[in-house]
Image: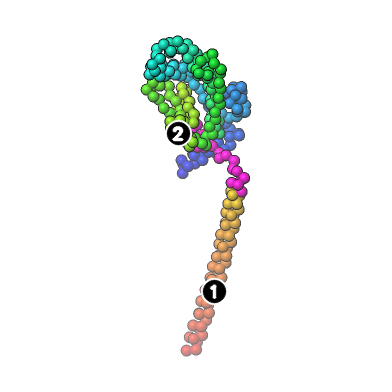
Amino acid sequence: NVNAQKIMAQKLKLEVAGNAETFERGEKLLGNDLQELGLEENTDHMKITFDEDRTVRYSMCMCCIVSLASCMWPITTMLFTPCLWYSLKKWAQSRIAAVTDKQLVLKQGSFGCGCWACCWNESTKSVPLNQITDLQVQQGCVQRCFDIREIRVETASATKEVPELVLIGLHDPLEVRAQILRVRDSAVPSSLSPHQQQSSQQQQVDTKQLEQIISSQQETMLQIKDVLQDMRTALISMDNKMNANEANAV
């Protein structure tokens, strides 16, 4: 019972999110960053921060490992190392991510073909929290060397090989995962469709009618009980009188 009350208290706290913030201790984004994510300035949220330096070093190492497996190493990698390093650094710096009580949003940019001479591409992706099935925190052997982890966002439509979203090099990824799942599991359900609202209202009406019928039946049963009690009393009285008359006759 105590655990159930605690869970209900957590849910009620989120249900009154309009009066109290869900992410009181989380770091906040600036107004311009919120607009870039497509969020309003007064949106309750938590900023997701990244370790840019470690992410760049890890990504550069992975590029070198991939290049080692090709026949063009080391000439190609040596020629494009400065360009590749700059491109990875700009990509790491461009990442803006936040989680609200409804969705997880990530914006990032990259140079075409991984070269600063190409055009700059940007993308913003949001994943509704109620569609997230799991958040996997992974750390491969190369990632362990750079002490970074990644969160793989999985949904029903995504696969383990191709997750819905990947967040690499976060600060405190375990806490971020726990916070997202906590909000997802405690969030107020989204508004119902008109058909669902009609069905819900009909169910409420049916429930009230059923309660009224049960209450009426209970009153009827009590009345029947009183009538039967009176009949029993009358029969006992008549039986006593008949016995008395027979005794007098004898």
The earlier-in-sequence mark between 2 and 1 is: 2
Residue at left offset 59%, top offset 61%:
216
Q: Mark 2 touching mark 1, by CB under 8 A?
A: no
Q: Is residue 96 visible?
A: no
Which residue is identified by label 2? 159
Residue at point 53%, 70% (across, down): 229
Q: Nearer the viewer, residue 23 or 77?
A: 77
Viewer-closest of 203 and 26? 203
What number is the disc on residue 133? none
Q: Amino acid at mark 1?
A: Met
Image x and y of residue 150, in percent: 44, 25
Q: Is residue 19 above or below residue 4?
A: above
Q: On the rendered structure, is 59 left or right of 231?
A: left
Q: Residue at x 38, y 19 (%)?
A: 69
Main SS, magenta region, reads helix
x, y percent for residue 161: 43, 30
Label 1 crowd bin: few (<14), some (14–19), many (20+), radius 10 Å: few
Residue under pointer 1 = 231
Give, as a single range, the part of the protein colored magenta.
180-198
Colour scheme used in the picture? Answer: rainbow
- Residue 211 rendering spot, x and y as whole percentages: 57, 56
Q: Is residue 11 above or below residue 67?
A: below
Secondary structure type for disc 1: helix
Q: In the depicted view, which residue is nearer to us: 95 or 9? A: 95
